């Protein structure tokens, strides 16, 4: 079977997990478009791109506010114009704005829902027709352990991330006969800059709850993404993969 060149779009592509995902896909010979937002600060993305180039990874960077459907449509249109197709979509963009529900503002609720859940709708809808027409696609949605078990102070984040897998299961059924798979990965606590910024004493308490005795590595999430993104993984769809070191089993 001849090797068919593939194109991937990764939202949140310049973050900790996103960077590892982009790198692992690139090593597989896949052309990678890394989507970023960063509050519209393009310089940070260009610095990231230059650093990745120094490391031997050549990525396209594309801007989008994933909360906004028109911005997502423009981003996808740009990628299709430049690369001709999108075979693999990784919905990885996400933020936290933690507070107990009694103190949570409507803005905190809506911002997290729009960034973490509406984004999956916005980007996937913009990509899906091209995949259906070509009878091929791999969609991988990044959820969270806290979607499965809940987390104090994260009703917005837990709700949004739980919604992602509901989306995965429904869409998987819609496109299963079109050669398109849709799956969810639910990472536990991963050693990204965001997690490493947590005070050490709190971080140690988190690690104490993880049976394998350590934080996960971004590369470990990326390995699962590349597995699900492979053309050989066509019989896996509508599934949720928990990568959490045994912290939550069900």
Image (spheres, rainbow, N blue to C red):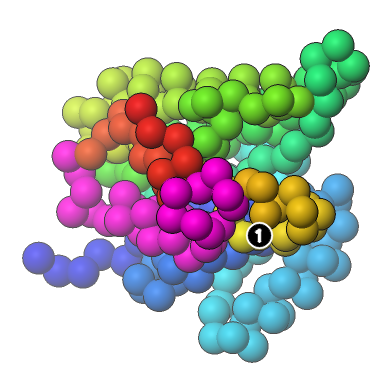
- Coordinates of residue 95 in the picture (x, y in percent): 73, 40
x 20%, y 44%: residue: 234
**Up/down of 51 relative to 89, above or below:** below
64 left or right of 76 in image: right
Q: Is residue 86 above or below residue 74?
A: below
Q: Residue at x 70, y 20 (%)?
A: 155
For the N terminus, the quadrant is bottom left
Q: Residue furthest left?
A: 1
* 81 to the left or right of 75: left
Residue 181 visible to an observer of this rendering: yes
Q: Is residue 167 above or below residue 36?
A: above
Residue that label 1 marks:
192
Q: Is residue 151 magenta?
A: no
Q: Secondary structure at mark 1?
A: loop
14 and 174: which is toward the camera: 14
Horizontal and vertical percent position of residue 62: 67, 57
- The residue located at (63%, 46%) in the rendering is 206
The magenta-colored residue range is 207-235
Which of 53 and 128 lies nearest the eye of the viewer? 53
The image position of residue 247, as x and y in percent, is 47, 41
Foreground residue among 205 and 141:
205
Residue reaching furthest to the top:
102
Q: Residue at x 86, y 48 (%)?
A: 39
Residue 141 appears in the picture as rendered: no
Q: Quadrant of residue 97?
A: top right
Residue 213: in magenta span: yes
């Amino acid at each position: 079977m001849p090797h068919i060149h593939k194109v991937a779009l990764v939202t949140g592509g310049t973050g900790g997990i996103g960077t590892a995902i982009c790198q692992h896909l690139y090593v597989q010979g896949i052309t990678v478009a890394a989507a970023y937002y960063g509050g519209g600060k393009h310089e940070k993305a260009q610095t990231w791109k230059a650093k990745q180039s120094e490391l031997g990874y050549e990525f396209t960077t594309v801007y989008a506010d994933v909360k906004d459907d028109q911005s997502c449509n423009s981003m996808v249109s740009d990628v299709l114009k430049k690369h001709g197709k999108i075979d693999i979509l990784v919905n990885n963009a996400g933020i936290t704005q933690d507070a107990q529900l009694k103190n949570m503002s409507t803005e905190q609720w809506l911002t997290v829902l729009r960034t973490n859940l509406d984004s999956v709708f916005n980007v996937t809808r913009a990509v899906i027709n091209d995949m259906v027409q070509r009878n091929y696609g791999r969609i991988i949605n990044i959820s969270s352990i806290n979607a499965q078990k809940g987390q104090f102070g994260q009703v917005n984040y837990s709700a949004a991330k739980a919604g992602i897998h509901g989306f995965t299961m429904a869409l998987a059924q819609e496109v299963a006969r079109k050669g398109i798979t849709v799956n969810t990965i639910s990472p536990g606590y991963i050693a990204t800059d965001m997690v490493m910024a947590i005070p050490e004493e709190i971080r140690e308490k988190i690690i104490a709850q993880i049976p394998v005795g350590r934080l996960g590595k971004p590369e470990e999430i990326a390995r699962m993404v590349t597995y699900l993104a492979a053309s050989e993984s066509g019989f896996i769809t509508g599934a949720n993969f928990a990568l959490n070191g045994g912290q939550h089993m069900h």
